[in-house]
């Protein structure tokens, strides 16, 4: 079981600059993933034992204050914020390289070939100094040993300078954590789920006003009620209940 008051969370966007280079696993946590982790021990372990954990939700920030938690994050850092920060940093580093030097590479592992194709097109425009590699895994709830071997081989052969994993929570976090030691890479790795669709344009992120007023969840519920109702209509009260239980324990 995950206890929010014991987690070490990144405090602010400014702190992202302090993350060192090298093989680093960066996960995010929000109300939904916190709820799931209460009943999924492997997922809870994956979140706790990653290198950095990002507070992706105003509810997490408020709950940390209520619980007087070890970490008191100053601001929400969405998966989109992490994505933008890391992509811009890699773009600048690649731009500084000498002529005739290969571009630094970003790899997207997850999602459909349709989404990945759109991502490749957009990265080429937004980040012209980056090389792009993509891999679409089989669409199934659980990968076979052969599937896993193929994914790991593709990542290791690509040897990217930045790796994004997008298979939705908790699958992406558990997969990355379970196979971490098999990944012979040297870069930051972020598990960012819906950001693949946001960046590709196949899903629309909430406008700025909704984000600033902590209503991005409501916007997603309105846009995709059939897919999101359980996460928010049931999940939000469940999160409150889980936090209250933790407070009195």
Image: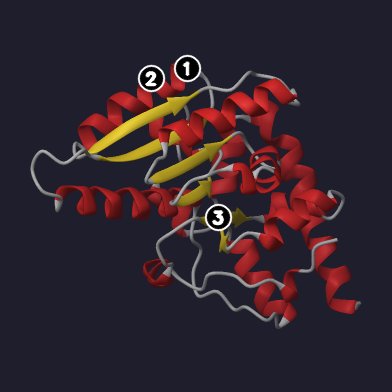
Residue 224 at x, y = what percent?
60, 29
Name above or below for residue 73 compared with residue 141: below
Name above or below for residue 80 compared with residue 106: below
Q: Which of marks 3 and 2 is in front?
A: 3
Q: How far apart are marks 3 and 2 (CA)?
A: 25 Å
Residue 179 at x, y = what percent?
66, 42
Q: Residue furthest right?
A: 249
Q: What element carries label 3?
A: strand
Determine which residue is flagged by label 3: 25
Residue 243 in the figure: left or right of residue 102: right
Q: Is mark 1 on a helix, strand or loop?
A: helix
Quarter occupied by residue 227: top right
> What's the mark number on residue 113?
1
Q: Is mark 2 on a helix, strand or loop?
A: helix
Residue 41 at x, y = what percent?
84, 52
Determine which residue is flagged by label 2: 117
Q: Quadrant of the C terminus?
A: bottom right
Question: Is there a contact, CB below 8 Å, between mark 1 and mark 2?
Answer: yes
Q: Which residue lies furthest to the left in this view?
A: 99
Quarter occupied by residue 67: bottom right
Label 2: few (<14), some (14–19) or many (≥20) C-alpha neighbours in 10 Å: few
């Amino acid at each position: 079981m995950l206890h929010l008051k014991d987690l070490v969370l990144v405090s602010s966007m400014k702190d992202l600059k302090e993350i060192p280079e090298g093989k680093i696993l960066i996960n995010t946590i929000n109300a939904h993933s916190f709820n799931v982790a209460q009943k999924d021990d492997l997922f809870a372990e994956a979140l706790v034992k990653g290198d950095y954990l990002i507070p992706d939700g105003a509810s997490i920030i408020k709950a940390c204050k209520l619980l007087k938690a070890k970490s008191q994050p100053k601001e929400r850092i969405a998966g989109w914020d992490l994505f933008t920060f890391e992509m811009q940093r890699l773009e600048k580093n690649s731009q500084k390289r000498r002529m005739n030097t290969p571009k630094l590479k970003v790899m997207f592992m997850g999602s459909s070939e349709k989404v990945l194709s759109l991502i490749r097109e957009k990265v080429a425009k937004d980040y012209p100094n980056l090389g792009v590699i993509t891999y679409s895994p089989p669409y199934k709830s659980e990968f076979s040993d052969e599937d896993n071997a193929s994914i790991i081989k593709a990542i290791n052969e690509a040897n990217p300078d930045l790796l994004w994993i997008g298979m939705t929570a908790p699958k992406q976090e558990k997969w990355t954590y379970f196979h971490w030691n098999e990944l012979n890479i040297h870069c930051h790795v972020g598990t960012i789920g819906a950001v693949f669709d946001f960046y590709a344009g196949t899903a629309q992120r909430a406008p700025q006003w909704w984000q600033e007023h902590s209503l991005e969840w409501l916007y997603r519920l309105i846009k995709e009620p059939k897919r999101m109702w359980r996460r928010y209509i049931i999940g939000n009260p469940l999160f409150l209940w889980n936090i209250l239980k933790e407070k009195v324990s």
